[in-house]
Structures are given as structure tokens and as C-alpha cells.
Image: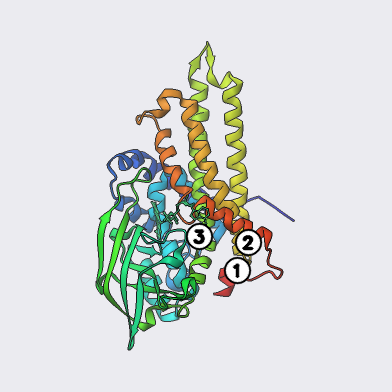
Amino acid sequence: MVDFTLTDEQRALREMAHDFAANEMRPVAWDYDRDSTWPEDILRKAWELGILNTHIGEEYGGPGIDFLGGALIEEELGWGCSGIGTSIACNGLATAPIVIGGSEELKREYLSSLTEDFKLASFCLTEPDAGSDVSGMRTTAVKKGDKYVINGSKCFITNGGYADFYTVYAKTDKDAGHRGISAFVVPPEAGVVVDKKEDKMGQRASNTATITFNECEVPADNLLGEENKGFKLAMMTLDRTRPGVAAMAVGIARAAFEFATDYSKERVQFGVPIAMHQAIQFMIADMATDVEAARLLVWKSAVLLDQGRRNTLESSHAKRFAADTAMKVATDAVQVYGGYGFIKEYPVEKLMRDAKIMQLYEGTSQIQRLVIARETLLPRRVEEPAATAAA
Ligand SMILES: Cc1cc2nc3c(=O)[nH]c(=O)nc-3n(C[C@H](O)[C@H](O)[C@H](O)COP(=O)(O)OP(=O)(O)OC[C@H]3O[C@@H](n4cnc5c(N)ncnc54)[C@H](O)[C@@H]3O)c2cc1C
């Protein structure tokens, strides 16, 4: 039987995240966006509340919240401020390769370090010449005795300027395309240089940095999974994290929808609140439907993971639709506000800028469509285990 009713525990989780978003994020979100301020105080509070490392199991000091629970939290964070929310969620992205492919020693050392103290980690896949097509990456990891030496540059790295360790993808076989990529845990003291912080259109509170690895020596034991199997690890990581990113997009869309709904009841033109005009009503109605549909896709993609099943298709459905929904709903919310929507003093222009990144990071909307097309045109006959099960 399909039942969309949340348990008491899930409702409590959502309420806790909502209170945090309403009381800690919303009051400062527009200031942090304007000044592009690093929200360390909010991140520390999120850590204290236990929502910075929801995915880390109890054996490493984490709460071990399941994927649906994580998605419920991320929707609220997206509703509060997706810029701060992205920095809160980043530990989940950075540590997924450790959870999936790390040795027990690496898990004990690095996962536990995040729960024992307030610490951050970054996920380093993208390079200046290798975005959607990561097989073109130029960063190399060369094995020398019991170490790997990593050289190269990564761009657009969330929390990169503040990370206490990095999960880094590098070529261990330069000529093997995506089959020559491996993943490593790299501590900053190995020789990581933060080159610059990006000045962004939206999500301005999150830190996005360019990082260089100069002759970075890491123990061979810092290899995650098998050598040359890093591409698969990255894809399994994204299957696990896309439901959460999509949930954040639902949060942005819901926030824009709520602001537009309230405003449409207050703003009077032609002698009536603009909500009385059918053109406005239909925009609000479409927003309501799209937010609801996006949330259902998110929940399905998360529940499949919780059931130990593969969710590649469903997580791309969720990410693509929720991201496009966030962009459409936020743009329409600006339309409902009219000229005021274009002015920074009103809340929806930030949401429109924030929404744009949802169509870009963790796989653009085009890349999600490529995945959906591949999974639809060439469906796998045997149901493969999910990333969790395969780990
Ligand atoms: C704020 C921010 C935070 C980020 N955080 C991280 C992070 O923490 N770690 C990390 O590793 N990366 C991160 N990224 C990088 C992000 O994942 C990439 O920007 C994204 O994957 C797209 O790569 P690209 O920018 O090189 O665009 P490109 O790959 O150059 O794409 C350009 C355009 O071409 C389209 N395109 C490309 N190939 C195809 C194709 N085959 N078919 C159809 N269309 C195609 C794309 O959809 C896009 O519209 C972040 C980016 C930003 C902006």
C-alpha cells in the first residue's frame, strides 16, 4: 500500500528543521545574501542541532537519519535560505564517497571527525575544463610507494575555502577517460591551496572556491574504493545526494509560492486584490501543483534509497523537475509582485537568483535529461542494488 502520511518522528524532524529555518536562517538570509557573508554562526548552530551531518551513522557519532528524513530537512533549509542550506548540506555530498567506498579506518577517522567537532568537508569533482563531462579532468594522482601525489585544480567547490578535508577525484590512468578516475580523501595540510572565492549571482551565503593541489602527498590508504573506479563512486554519490538537492529546490519553490500567495491577497489593482484576477489565480494554481508534484518525486527517489533500491532514474526525475520548478515558480513569483518583485527590498528577487543554481549544480537539467533518456530508452533488465546496498 502506498501511504504518504509521515510518521510522528518524521513530522518532528520536519518541525525541528522548520523552526531552525524560520528562527535562525530567515531573519538573516537577505543580509547574508547582500553581503555574501560566510554564515559560520548558523552552520555551527546547525551542527549543534544535529542537522549538519544527518547521513552519518550512529557508529560514527551521527544521527543516522534516513534519506526521506534528510529530504524533509533539506526542503525546510531551502525554504529558509538555500545559500546557507547548500553549505549545511555539503558535508553530506563530500562524505558520501567515504560512506560508500571508504575503508573502516577512513570512516572512523573522517566521519567521526565531523560529529566530534564542528568541521566541514568539500567534494572536489569539477574542473575548469571538466564540468558535465568529468572524464576530461586533468588532475592527476600518481602512486609513489605507499603514497599518491595529487596535482591539479578544481573549481566551483562548495565550502572549499573552509573545508577541514576534501574528497578529490583525480586521474590515476590519464588515457582511460572515465575509467581512469580515482577518489581520495585529502587533508588541507597535504598542500591544498584555496585560490579564490567566487562572487555569485545567487546562494551568495554559501562559499564557492577554486582549489589547487600542489604536489599533495596522501597515504595510499586514503584511496576511496578501488583504483580507477572513482567515476562509479561519483555517480553513486550523486544518486544519493540528488533527492536532497531536489528537496532544497522544492523549499525554494514553496517559499516563492507562499510569498506570491500572500502578496496577491494584499496588493490591490483595479479595485480588487490581484488574487481576484484569474491570470494571477492560474499562476498561483500552477505553482501549487508544481510544488506538490516536485515533492512527491523527491519523496519517491528518497524512499527507494531507504529501501536499498537503485534510484538513478527517479533521482534524476526529482532533480530535473524540482530544479526547473524552483526556477519557474520563483520567476512567476516575481511576476505576481510586478515591479516590486524586481526590487531587492522585496523577498522574491533573491529566490529567483537562488533558484537558478538548482538547474546547474549536481548535474545540469540537460544532464538529468540525458540520464532520464538513457534509463528510459535502455532500461536495465535486472534491478540493480542501490548505492547503499552496493556499499
Ligand atoms: C555555486 C556552485 C556550486 C558548486 N559546487 C560544486 C561542488 O561542491 N563540487 C563540485 O565538484 N562541483 C560543484 N559545482 C560545479 C557544477 O556541478 C558544474 O558547474 C556543473 O556540473 C556544470 O558544469 P559546467 O559548469 O562546467 O558546465 P558545462 O559542462 O560546460 O555545461 C555548459 C552547458 O552545456 C550543457 N551541456 C553539457 N554537456 C551536454 C550534453 N552532453 N548534452 C546537452 N547539454 C550539455 C550543460 O547542461 C550547460 O547548459 C558547483 C557549481 C556552482 C556554480
Quarter of the image with the N terminus is: bottom right
- Reading the image, the residue beneath label 1 is 386
Answer with mark 1 or mark 3, whichever residue precedes in sequence: 3
Task: For the residues labelled 1 and 2, say whether their Cβ atoms are less than 8 Å apart.
Answer: yes
Label 3, residues with CA under 10 Å away: few <14, some 14-19, many ≥20 = many
| Distance between mark 2 and mark 3 Cα atoms | 13 Å
Q: Dot 1 lies on which element? A: loop
Is residue 183 placed above or below 274 in the rendered structure? below
- Reading the image, the residue beneath label 3 is 241
Q: Nearer the viewer, residue 147 or 80?
A: 147
Is residue 158 placed above or below 388 in the rendered structure? above
Identify the residue at horizontal 38%, vertical 64% (top origin): 124
Q: Quadrant of ligand 1?
A: bottom left
Residue that sits furthest to the right in the current view: 1
Answer with mark 2 or mark 3, whichever residue precedes in sequence: 3
Where is residue 96 drawn, in percent x and y?
A: 46, 67
Q: How is the image coloured?
A: rainbow
Ligand 1 is within 8 Å of the C-beta of the residue at disc 2:
no
Identify the residue at horizontal 56%, vertical 69% (top origin): 387
> Which residue type carries mark 1?
Ala
Q: Dot 2 lies on which element? A: helix
User: Is 50 left or right of 305, judged from the image as shown?
Assistant: left
Where is residue 324 drawn, in percent x and y?
A: 53, 44
Is residue 155 placed above or below 251 in the rendered structure? below
- The total number of labels drawn is 3
- Reading the image, the residue beneath label 2 is 304
| Distance between mark 1 and mark 2 Cα atoms | 8 Å
> Which residue type carries mark 3?
Thr
Q: Dot 3 lies on which element? A: helix
